[in-house]
Image: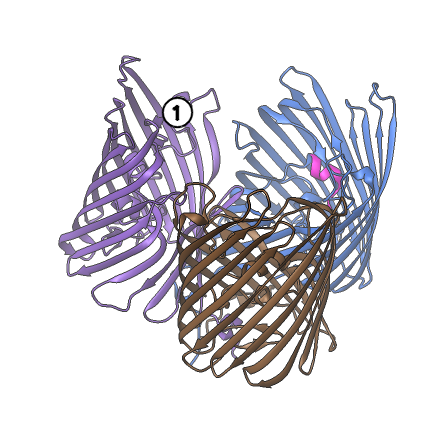
Chain colours: A brown, B purple, C blue
Amino acid sequence: CIVISPVLLAKNNDVDISGYVMIDHNQFDDTFLENDDDPDKTGIRRARLSFKTNIDENWKTKLQLGFADDSAEIKDAYLRYKGRQWADLTIGQQKEPFGLEKLTSSRNNMMMERSITSEALAPGRSIGANLSGDLSSITWQLGYFQPDETQSSSAVTGRLTWVPWQQNNNLVHLGFAFSERDLNGSEYRINEPLEVNFSDSLIEGTKLFAEDVSLKGVEFLWQQHGFTTTAEWQENKVTDINSEQYQYQGGYLQLSYQFSGENREYKKGEIDDIITPGWEITDRYSQFDLLEENNKVQTYTVGVNYTVNKNLKFMANYVKTKQVDNDSTINGITENGDAVLLRAQYTF
Amino acid sequence: CIVISPVLLAKNNDVDISGYVMIDHNQFDDTFLENDDDPDKTGIRRARLSFKTNIDENWKTKLQLGFADDSAEIKDAYLRYKGRQWADLTIGQQKEPFGLEKLTSSRNNMMMERSITSEALAPGRSIGANLSGDLSSITWQLGYFQPDETQSSSAVTGRLTWVPWQQNNNLVHLGFAFSERDLNGSEYRINEPLEVNFSDSLIEGTKLFAEDVSLKGVEFLWQQHGFTTTAEWQENKVTDINSEQYQYQGGYLQLSYQFSGENREYKKGEIDDIITPGWEITDRYSQFDLLEENNKVQTYTVGVNYTVNKNLKFMANYVKTKQVDNDSTINGITENGDAVLLRAQYTF
Amino acid sequence: CIVISPVLLAKNNDVDISGYVMIDHNQFDDTFLENDDDPDKTGIRRARLSFKTNIDENWKTKLQLGFADDSAEIKDAYLRYKGRQWADLTIGQQKEPFGLEKLTSSRNNMMMERSITSEALAPGRSIGANLSGDLSSITWQLGYFQPDETQSSSAVTGRLTWVPWQQNNNLVHLGFAFSERDLNGSEYRINEPLEVNFSDSLIEGTKLFAEDVSLKGVEFLWQQHGFTTTAEWQENKVTDINSEQYQYQGGYLQLSYQFSGENREYKKGEIDDIITPGWEITDRYSQFDLLEENNKVQTYTVGVNYTVNKNLKFMANYVKTKQVDNDSTINGITENGDAVLLRAQYTF
């Protein structure tokens, strides 16, 4: 008389289905917009479905789909082989191993939006093959990727992290990552909003046809008794098809405190879920420089998060931005802006 | 030795996955088409997947995706809080509380297509926050929504229903709903087919840039011993950016009989599933008026439904339409048309 | 204390969720491209999700969705009635019963890509109603379909298979199929790549507005002790709206050997999964003729597959192609090309 789901009897392995949805409201000044649009928007920021299986003890797979209002997109689609002690091999579409904040799932980050630098410089998802291993307090990753689907391009991306001190989730983490990218003349352009997703992409670099991109990043994380300090710095150098060079760089410093006194989970060089419910206050200074364009952006954000339980979180961020454009032709323009962001996020 | 699905062991809550598919055939006169196309079409009318969870006893979530031949769309994406006795709060993308037929799931309606009035005037899904409660025989809903994603727009929509008499699913229901909509100059245009989904959208209002829309609707439902009488009337008044006013109004009267003698389930002001399998015959008169455009549409539909079980239903509708265009420049044109609609619908 | 998934308690039937993902790398000569693009591409070839239910002992349903990088598509969406002994009825979007290789799921084919002929001539998925039955060693299928969604078109497609000899999965299979297609002036054009999916579609027939297409195919399969011989030949005759006729024809001969000595499963006229893990070597000669265009294509492929288990397979193909264009205006051009295809495929 035990009823067992037919999924178990089917010849297919058990599929772990999960997902999350973020519903956001953004309110911001006109200075966040290119045209005279309306400074107010509510929308679904992300809706994701994941299908994970353990084929056997050595092989795992993941398929993650992302849905927006009228489209669907493949996010992760990879196969992971864990059969060797010294390294795991991941084949398929996955995040390139670069940048602590970029590698943290968007549902676990402390701020509602990643810093401009992480969005503008860190590579994100590509198709490729990645090796990853760990040795006591050190993790390493090295992968070969195809960054641009329409072009014969390639990238070698690697990351090294070290935890010099750890007691449970109290720890210090140091990280270094690089990416050498052969873009073969693909279009390349910095084009990001000012950490306010539903606003316009105001940070605009020169439109380049890039030959090579050389990217480096350093990471620092210290979490203890609910206090967390995170900092990253990233720099890249883009060489275009006329051998001209462009440099972009930036970083952030972020502080947060969880009133429970407990920190987020930390696993093999990456930040994972909040463990205990309750309140969290957050604070971030973020900066991004477009050196050749003589353009610089700074944002300062304070936030408060309330985690009801592992499936439900509410977030609020207040963002102040400053954009300094020293382009010689316009002789120095500074624009300031304020924005309020609200989020309801559920995980299933 | 009890095998339990790993979904249960995972840190995620159990996800209730369900869905439905409608496969339709429409056959119609040339008068349903704008050009000289072909009056005959078979297609997938709707394919939906839903992911529901109970985060805990107070919080519930839903994500519903709609798939068409080559696109995906987020339908519902909301979070519901049921922790207060006097009201539930629903945050996210959801149906605005307006119109009995519009609020009934398309898989439970008596006719294959909703009436023109419900499609043209009732708001449907928006992002917002909605409060809903009930008190003995009364239900109420009041919400604040963002009707247009690309514009700073807002709507306050509310609905009140009363059941003066009820014995199980035998009951009389009265409803009233309103929506005050600030569209801030968004494009607004009535553009609907004549209750034949795969035909062209022949009902065309003036293209407006709307400042405000004021919408009202009344509902009547009486179901007893398998007989059902449903009627709705809706009116709106659109004020455009030049302060000109346009009025649209319409409604329907619908009769049906289920040979089992049992009615559909009724829950908190809404119609739900058929409970008993078997045959049902249906009948609807529907009317829609574009007052300023001097244009009027009437349809008369008879139908028969066969419910095999809770997962499977077949439907057939025969539609007669009459379109009277009294626009002064064309001095009165009347067009009649006939259509046959067939559907196979399965739910899982 | 037995925990049971709430899916079981829900009013919905149990849903069998499965899926598969193919991650491909294609490397090829410039001769596979129309422009001077880059002869190298890695991508997700297919990502599929299936939702199957048994409504009751007589009714089954399937919904299969296909995801590409930024879109979703309904593949299968049908309802199957198995309540009569002499035949099953399938209503909805499904594969028309034509062509052994086309009817075999892409995750079970021996070669990474189907032959040009199967892709160019076999109808694939349409909406319609199909009857299928079997009688000892014979299977038959006959269906009525709508091949073109935007046009009033229709097709009658049928298939007959016979297994003159069978011992378990050792067997000889003969098949014949036809399709009579009334396309009502729809655009018709042969446009296929040379069995290298990420390359350009170089095989280009005349652009026709087709009135009728008459299609025939024969199939041969012999599998024994791990050896498999497959051959198909297909011919069609297209009559355009000016009553001009165009003929296209082609086929393939394919050999393979599984080192386990076991063959694929065979069910009611179709090839199914590999049963035993291990290595397989494959070999195919494929040919396609555009008679009126005086254009002919030949490919020769060798491959090796490694099946880790029922959920995981790796494939490699080496393709040599020869394209002979005898169009009178260009007086005979022959182009040769080479390509290497790699695939990692997982099923869940």
Quarter of the image with the C terminus of chain B is bottom left
Disc 1: host chain: B
Please state the total of marks drawn on the protein image.
1
Quarter of the image with the N terminus of chain B is bottom right
> C188 and C170: which one is in front?
C188
Q: Please, what is the three-letter code of the amino acid marked with disc 1?
A: Phe
Image x and y of residue C296, in percent: 82, 30
C333 magenta-colored: no
Q: Helix, strand or loop at disc 1?
A: helix
Q: Main secondary structure of the magenta part?
A: helix
Image x and y of residue A262, in percent: 46, 81
> A303 and C278: which one is in front?
A303
Q: Residue at x 59, y 66 (%)?
A: A103
Image x and y of residue C135, in percent: 62, 47
> A37 and C334: which one is in front?
A37
Q: Is residue B2 above or below residue C106?
A: below
C119 magenta-colored: yes
Q: Is residue B85 above or below residue A249?
A: below
Q: Residue at x 62, y 49 (%)?
A: A293
Query: Which quarter of the figure has residue B314?
Result: top left
Give the residues in magenta.
Answer: C113-120
The residue identified by callout 1 is: B32
Q: Is residue B64 left or right of residue C278?
A: left
Q: Is residue C45 above or below residue A282?
A: above
Q: Is residue A325 above or below residue C327?
A: below
Query: Which quarter of the figure has residue A126?
Result: bottom right
Q: Residue at x 76, y 56 (%)?
A: C315
Specify whether residue C225 is in view.
no
